[in-house]
Every structure is written in structure tokens, then in C-alpha cells.
């Protein structure tokens, strides 16, 4: 890995750590999703609201739900990265006399 990539990774790690530290120091700052907030707003507007559907399976804890969400995001990023790399390789094969800039 070259120095540029290592510095980008270091900046990304610092941003994640700083955001977690800043976010954890605020009062009442919890990692809550939009689903819970939407349900709270719906019951506040209509106290007799009943959901139309029930989940087929509920994760046993919030950590498991976060893990599944992270795995879903990683799988999507992998598929997207593979597709973009595949298309870039195809475009480079179509232009063989092009000089590579060394990226």
C-alpha cells in the first residue's frame, strides 16, 4: 500500500473515533433508528394505532440487529465495488493503447 492510501485510512479511522467520542458524551445520545422514532410519532398522533404487519423474526438484541445491518451494508458495498471494478476493467480492455497514469 502506498503512503496516500495509508493516510486516507488513518483519516477515516480518526473521523470514526472522534464521532463516537463526541456522540457518546452528549446527554441522551443513544443509537436509535428511525423505526422507533416513527412508531413513537404514530402513537403520539393516533394512540389507538395498530401496525398492519408484524415482523417474521425479531433479532434478540440491538447488537444483533446492528450486526445484520452492517453485514447488509458490507455486502451491498462489495457488490457495487465489484460491478464498478468490472466495468472499469472492461473499459480499459476496449482502449489498450491508452497510457496508464499509475493510479
Image (cartoon, helix red, strand yellow):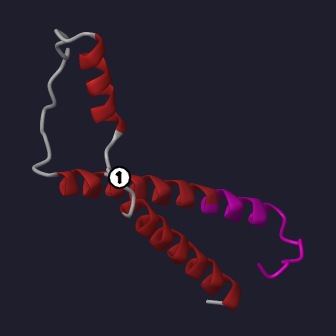
Front residue of 89 and 27: 27
Magenta stretch contains residue 101: yes
What residue is shown at x 36% (from left), y 36% (from top)? 34
Helix or strand or loop: what does disc 1 sit on?
loop
Query: Which of the 4 image quadrants contains residue 53?
Result: top left
Magenta stretch contains residue 79: no
Front residue of 89 and 14: 14
Which residue is farthest front?
A: 27
Query: Which of the 4 image quadrants contains residue 95?
Result: bottom right
- Compared with residue 76, is residue 48 higher up or lower down, i.e. above or below? above
> What span is in magenta?
85-103
Image coordinates of residue 91 in percent, x first then y, are 76, 59
Screen quadrant of the N terminus: bottom right
Front residue of 13 and 75: 13
What residue is shown at x 49% (from left), y 71% (from top)? 18
Image coordinates of residue 83 in percent, x first then y, are 57, 55
What residue is shown at x 76% (from left), y 78% (from top)? 103
The answer to whether 51 appears left or right of 69 in the picture is left
What residue is shown at x 14% (from left), y 25% (from top)? 54
Callout 1 crowding tier (Cα within 10 Å): few <14, some 14–19, many ≥20 = few
Image coordinates of residue 94 in percent, x first then y, are 80, 61
Image coordinates of residue 21 in percent, x first then y, are 42, 69
**Where does label 1 land, which residue?**
29
- Compared with residue 16, is residue 76 higher up or lower down, i.e. above or below? above
Q: How many marks?
A: 1
Front residue of 81 and 56: 56
The answer to whether 47 appears left or right of 60 in the picture is right
Amino acid at each position: 500500500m502506498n503512503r496516500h492510501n495509508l493516510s486516507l485510512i488513518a483519516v477515516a479511522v480518526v473521523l470514526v473515533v472522534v464521532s463516537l467520542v463526541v456522540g457518546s458524551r452528549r446527554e441522551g445520545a443513544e443509537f436509535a433508528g428511525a423505526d422507533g422514532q416513527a412508531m413513537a410519532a404514530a402513537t403520539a398522533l393516533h394512540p389507538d394505532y395498530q401496525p398492519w404487519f408484524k415482523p417474521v423474526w425479531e433479532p434478540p438484541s440491538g447488537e444483533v440487529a446492528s450486526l445484520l445491518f452492517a453485514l447488509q451494508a458490507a455486502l451491498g458495498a462489495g457488490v457495487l465495488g465489484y460491478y464498478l471494478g468490472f466495468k472499469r476493467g472492461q473499459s480499459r480492455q476496449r482502449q489498450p493503447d491508452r497510457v496508464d497514469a499509475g493510479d
